Image (spheres, helix red, strand yellow):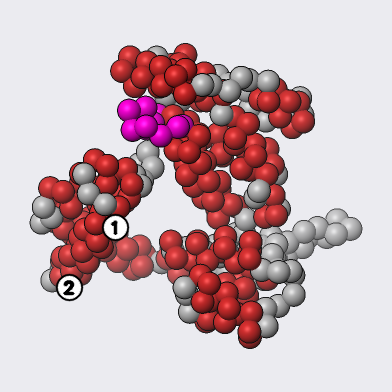
Amino acid sequence: MTTTALAFPSPASAASLESYIRTVQRFPLLTAEEEHELATRFRQNDDLEAARTLVLSHLRLVVNIARGYLGYGLPHADLIQEGNIGLMKAVRRFDPERGVRLVSFAVHWIRAEIHDFILRNWRMVKVATTKAQRKLFFNLRSLKPGSETLSPGEVTAMAQHLNVKESDVVEMEMRLGGQDVALEGYSADGEEGYGPIDYLADPHDEPLALLENAQLGTLREKGLGKALTNLDPRSRRIIEARWLNEDGSATLHELAAEFGVSAERIRQIEQKALLQMKSVIRAAEGGA
C-alpha cells in the first residue's frame, strides 16, 4: 500500500490547511461492521479501494492528534503529513479479527511517526537519541508548568513522576532550553559572512578513520548475523520484528498476541535476547 496508490488528499495539495481540514471532516465515519468488512477485504484480497476508504474515514483523527504537537514549532501541515503515513501503516497492519477498532490501533502508529518527525527536525543537534530520552523529551515538555527553569523541588517531583534520575531531567531541560545557532554564515551589505560550519573539521573523513570505520562496520555486521543465529526461533522473531523491520517495529502487544503470552513476557524475552546478542557482538569485535 503506497500513498500514490491510495491517492487521498493531503495538506500539501489542498489550497490551504483550513480547506484540507474541512475536506477531511466531510468523510463519513464507519460503523464497526463497515470497518470490519473493509479491513477484511483489504487483508484477504489486497483491495486498495477498501484501504483507501479506511484511511479517508480516519484522516480527521490525524488532524486532531497532530494539533497536540504544535508547541514544537513545526508546521501543522507537516505534522499531519507524517501522521498520515502512520495511519497508512496502521491500516496495512490492522487485523479486524482481534476485536479492536482501527481508531484505537492507529493512534500508536500516528503518534510514532509524528514523534520521529519532530525528533528529526526540531533541532539540528538531536536532543533525544535513546528510547528513554525520547520518552523524557515528550513528557517533560507536556508536564513543565511554563518557560521558567525548573526549581529543585520541581525537578525532584518530575523525576519521581517519570521514574527517571533527577540528573536526566536537568540535562533534558538544558537541551530543550538551548538556543538554535545557524551553522552557515550570512552575507551583509554584499560582504561574505562566516558561520560555525566554516570552522568545523570532520575527523571521520581522514583515511585512517574511514578504514577503521569500514572494518568496524564489517565486524558488527558479521557479529549481528552470528548473534541472531545463536538465538532460539522465538527470540529471533521478536528481535527482528522489534528492531530489524524496515516497515516499522512491531509492538509488544502485537507480538504477545502472536505468541499467546503477555506483553511483559515479550519484553523479558526481548531484553534477554538483546543482552545475549551484545555479548556475542562484543566477543566478535574483541577477537578481530
Amino acid of disc 1: Glu
Image quadrant assignment for residue 198: bottom right
Q: Is residue 3 left or right of residue 194?
A: left
The reply to whether discs 1 and 2 touch (Cβ–Cβ < 8 Å) is no
Q: Pick the residue in front: 263 or 121.
A: 263
Residue position for label 2: 286
Looking at the rendered structure, the secondary structure element under dot 2 is helix
Image quarter hosting the N terminus: top left
Q: Position of residue 105 (x, y in %)?
A: 44, 38
Q: Pick the residue in front: 260 or 134.
A: 260
Confirm whether the magenta stretch covers residue 93.
Answer: yes
- How many numbered marks does the figure carry? 2
* Residue extent of the magenta highlight: 92-102
In the image, what residue occupies the spot 77% across and 63% down? 193
In the image, what residue occupies the spot 51% across and 50% down? 116
Q: CA distance from mark 1 to mark 2?
A: 33 Å
In the image, what residue occupies the spot 58% across and 23% down? 29
Of the residues under marks 1 and 2, which one precedes in the sequence?
1
Residue position for label 1: 264
